[in-house]
Image (tube, grey):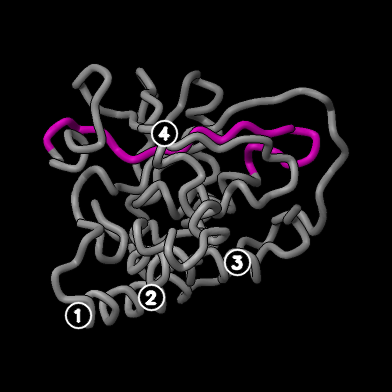
Amino acid sequence: MRMPTVLIGFVGLSLFACAHEQDHKMPTNLPTQPGQSTGKTEKLYVAAGCFWCIEGQMELLKGVSEVVSGYAGGKTPNPTYEQVSSGTTGHAEVVEVTFDPGVIQKADLLRIFFVSHDPTQLNRQGPDVGTQYRSAIFYRSDEEKKLAQRIKDEIISEKLFPGKVVTTIEPLGPFTRAENYHQNYYAKFEKASDAERAKMNAGYCSYVVSPKVAKFREQFAKLLK
């Protein structure tokens, strides 16, 4: 899963995946700068493969105050990482994004979500394979469901990707916070010493998460903290 037995082959696959994910255009109506704070917060729940990746991206945005990694979309109550990783619980690795809608709107977060991963890969992202790595938007109301569908239709109509967009739109249901060591994982990796990184999943972070975060910083530089 995240501990490849053959690093060279893993690195090759990872770099291929990253190159493939960059092969798309950008939405035409993304904001060019953050808005003004309202002092209020809202939440968004999305899945885009490994939650270390999407968490490491979303927490960089102005207006985003917190990103929590967790599990949603399955039937097993309070699942563990090991259970979700087995692919048998129906859960996806999900992030809960808390944000100020005055600074960045939910619609724009969804647009950013679509181009921060490859929504044409069914039940996988690069080397991570299984329904737990599916591309998904989780809604809590009819309003959120309609918004998710509208943005998905917009992304499809703009033909940003050469393949079919397979992102699912699902009711949220229970959201289970992931184990503490998963929280802010990539941020901790970036600040870690070499000795500390040796105890983390350094290969995966270096060859999968880092290129995604670097590309995200480049694409959305004007919207970052």
State which mark lies toward you, 4 or 2: 4
Q: Residue furthest front?
A: 195
Q: CA distance from mark 3 to mark 2?
A: 15 Å
State which mark lies toward you, 3 or 4: 4
Find disc 2 in the rendering and name its residue: 20
Residue type indicated by callout 2:
His
Q: CA distance from mark 4 to mark 1?
A: 30 Å
In the rendered image, residue 66, in percent from the top left (x then y), is placed at 61, 35
Above or below 24: residue 197: above
Find disc 3 in the rendering and name its residue: 26
Q: Earlier in the sequence, mark 4 or mark 2?
A: 2
Q: Within 10 Å of the Cα at label 1, are there few (<14), some (14-19), or many (20+) other Cα atoms? A: few
Q: CA distance from mark 4 to mark 2?
A: 31 Å
| x 39%, y 56%: residue | 119
Q: Earlier in the sequence, mark 1 or mark 3?
A: 1
Query: Is residue 96 among what the camera can see?
Result: yes
Query: Is residue 152 among what the camera can see?
Result: no
State which mark lies toward you, 4 or 1: 4
In the rendered image, residue 182, in percent from the top left (x then y), is placed at 40, 41
Find disc 4 in the rendering and name its residue: 180
* Span colored in magenta: 88-107
The label shown at residue 9 is 1
Residue type indicated by callout 4:
Asn
State which mark lies toward you, 1 or 2: 1
